[in-house]
Amino acid sequence: MTDHSETDQVAVETPQPLQSPLVDITTINAAESLFRGDGVIDPWASTQAIHLADLYVFSRLPRYPLPVPMEAQGLDQGTPFLLRRLQKLDSDVLTVERCILDPSERHLNPDYLADAFEGFSQWIENNETGYKNLLRVHNQDWIRLGQRERNLSDGYFYNVKNLKSMGAVIPKALALDVALEDLLYTFDVVLRYPLYGEAAGAGNTYLTHPIREQQNLPTMRRENSSPVELPFSFGSILAPYFPALSVEQYANLLHEGRSVLQELKIVDDDTGTFNDGAVTEFMDAVHLTVRLKKPAKALGVFGGILSMLSPLTTWTSVTAAVGGGAISVAANLWSGNVPLGTSQFRWLRWALDWHVTVDEPKEPY
């Protein structure tokens, strides 16, 4: 329930999930693919770009996980251009959360391996077109050479090569007309879901790609939880203009949007509250019309880009809530000595819902 106090602030019931959330590189790759201009686009790119924009501007210290086998520590790790650009613009944002396991810990419990692959296979059958389009993106040089082959010496984090001895794997690759290494690679991507969820932490939100989020791994449980309210969805405001943006422009918009929020102090770091007056001022500032006024210096680049793109339509209400609930996976999914403080991996899912009201087009002033 939202309470209005005498200081004209809106209390957030659960601010913790926005303090230090996690977003995985697969999501960042999806968003980047939308703006590269080469026509090879992740099938979930637009949705992920919206979610990433909201997580980036509203969270305090977002992080990203990087799988690092123990033998690869100290090596230069490959990351997406979008991630590097955002880190250059905001040096304290998107810090790395290294997920390091030695070879003895990178083994899945054989009692669950077959069931996990069967569930993944069924997901592919239900999403074959999207899956193959995703593979096209991940076989582009900027991912294959820049990340897949650079970060993992054999291309996999877990022991998925052992699946070759299972009767169902090779026939599945043949039936899909995909390379066996691609099938194993994407399955390996899915299997990192609980590892990254554990890195996010029980009180934090983890924004992941649908190829992970839509899986039902063995021992996985999904729970409901109270939504975390946002004053509006910044990503949904930008979404109509995605086709006109480059990677650099998208990154700049996220940086400038975050800067404006901080300058207006929409989110109070100490109390975790949203200031109603500041929200109104921000919405006035980012109305996508030819008239851009406040606030002050921070709107320099931000206002310039928006004014170039802007139609004669005014957004009057963009309210949002993050309410995906909790996910947990039992630690016995692994057979190695995974360093856990509890018997469960548990994290909060990022699921953004928003409602948008748009005024009728207006003449420019």
Image: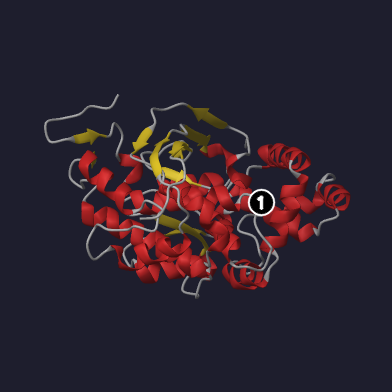
Task: Please say if 351 is above or below 46.
Answer: above
- Farthest left residue in view: 6
- Foreground residue, 316 or 157? 316
- Foreground residue, 278 or 186? 278
Point out the image quarter for the C terminus.
bottom left
Residue 64 picture quarter: bottom left
Q: Is residue 339 visible?
A: no
Within 10 angstroms of label 1, few (less than 14), some, or many (20 or more) residues?
A: some
The amino acid beneath tag 1 is: Pro
- Farthest top residue in view: 1
Q: Position of residue 104 (x, y in %)?
A: 57, 56
Point out the image quarter for the N terminus.
top left
Task: Please say if 175 is above or below 11.
Answer: below
Q: What residue do we see at 22% from left, 62% from top? A: 296
Q: In the rendered image, which residue does mark 1 sit on?
A: 43
Drawn side of residue 55 relative to residue 162, left or right: left
